[in-house]
Image: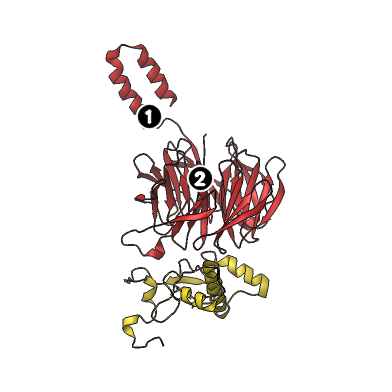
Chain colours: A yellow, B red
Amino acid sequence: MSWDGTHEQWGAIQLQNRFMKLASRRMNARDNNAWVAMRMIGEVATRTGSNDPKVIRDYLTGPDFAIAAFKGQKQTLRHWNQQLRQPILLGDGRMIVSVSPQEGFLHQTSELDTLGFDQPETKCKLQ
Amino acid sequence: MQVAMKLSIKSGMRAIAFNVFALHALAFAITSQAIAFTAYVSNEKGNSISIIDTDKLAVTKTVPVGHRPRGIALNKDGSELYICAGDDDLIQILDTKKLAIVGTLQSGPDPELLILSPDGKLLYISNENDNLVTAIDVATRKAVAEIPVGVEPEGMGLSPDGKVLVNTSETTNMAHLIDTQTRKIFANVLVDARPRAAQYTPDGSELWVTSEVGGTVSVIDAASPKVKQKIGFEVPGLSKEAIQPVGLRFTPDGKRAFVALGPANRVAVIDTATKKIEKYLLVGQRVWQLAFTPDAKFLYTTNGVSNDVSVIDVASLKVVKSIAVGSFPWGVAIAPQ
């Protein structure tokens, strides 16, 4: 899963606490996806000092973009399909037992690219 | 040192022929490390403080304290250790002679890190959950100010003259510069993602901020205050995501900086003048905070995942010892006694 109410590591507990104050429940995956999306825009707005959609989009899809999103490492965009590289939480709804990528799975670009389809494995092209 | 001085005085009174022997004896006395300091290590999940004798390089006692102890700081004479007990929402005061908790300070919710003002009168505390920095008068044990800062305040640094307090906020990605007289923020400096430690160079000309997720150290010109340079790290065989700069310390002469690189399990040694990385020292897993012994001959690192402390010989830049401590060691402070 991309996120779960039981995830607490890497400062995630602070985000869960803030969300609990706001919504009286823990943050689920959908909540978190929305939060990350807004956070990406906010991050780029502070980095570029701009609110121009074109400037923001260019930075977002450019080589310098990275965000912190409480999963223990920086998250970046795959330039070839604009997916967010992110760790996957492994849990059963009661606790998180492990986080992938698992140790030992190596990749020439980013170990996060050992998750999901990689560029050479697909014929899809970004339109 | 006392042993060494006695030897040198004695040898001085003897004939010149004996001086070679005296020199050998002096060298031996120095390398055999005559002074013992006390290192305190907070164990975040062990809910305890490990006490280390730096001469024996061993834990002599483990003292149970409050819940989730992280940031720790000593008062000026080393008689009291202040402990952020995050899950108890307070600061505990440990008497370092009796090794017992003798009082508490009302810090506000979830205190994470704290720093003592250069005159020893005030404690500045970052409250992670409340986006505040709290100032507490050590003598009266009362909070005297609450300063609103960014989201998830973390690192705390003071300029050598005590006039500027720096607080980093992990989620806002800024170093907030606070005037300690007016207790107001006068500048916000945007740095890379998840800033952790903030330290002024001993001459006060530069402010260095580590960014855990960004993987860099931002060097800020203290006068302007603007980022003038960013220092990146590269360790062969390690992915760039694994390099996460956290703890940061300068040698007292300001010539070198030591930066803990978290899950890279290494401490980077940086030449402060050229900003070049001289060496990477392999330490324990998820290296976190750093502290020098008062004579600056050794640097202690807390290693959060391997549950130990690494001891670095500063002169030879070698890791000389690992000392097992409690569960999830986090903060470290070293007293002259």
In-front residue for pair B77/B174? B174
| Chain letter for the residue marked with disc 2 in the picture | B
Q: Residue at x 54, y 74 (%)?
A: A41
**Picture quadrant of residue B148:** bottom right
Circle 1 residue: B30
Q: Which chain does tag 1 point to?
A: B
Rendered view: B316 above or below A7: above
Residue A87: percent from left, percent from top: 44, 73
* Disc 2 residue crowd, few under 14, some 14–19, many 20+, Cα 10 Å: few
Whether residue B27 is visible, yes or no, is: yes
Q: Is residue B180 left or right of residue A111?
A: right
**SS class, disc 1:** helix
Front-lying residue, B185 or A8:
B185
The Cα–Cα distance between marks 2 and 1, rounded to whole angstroms, is 33 Å
Residue at left 58%, top 78%? A31
Q: Residue B54: x and y, percent?
A: 45, 38
Q: Is residue B205 left or right of residue B12?
A: right
| Count of marks overlaid on the render | 2
Question: Which percent across, then down, holds residue B324?
Answer: 43, 49
Q: Measured along the vertical axis of the image, is residue B3 above or below residue B157?
A: above
> Which residue is tagged 2?
B205
Give coordinates of residue B277: x percent, y percent. Answer: 36, 51
Nearer the observer, A1 or B120:
B120
- Mark 1 packing: few (<14 Cα in 10 Å), some, or many (20+)? some
- Amino acid carrying mark 1 in the image: Ile
Q: Quadrant of residue A29?
A: bottom right
Residue lying at 31% horizontally and 82% vertically, measured from the top left = A120
Identify residue type, mark 2.
Ser
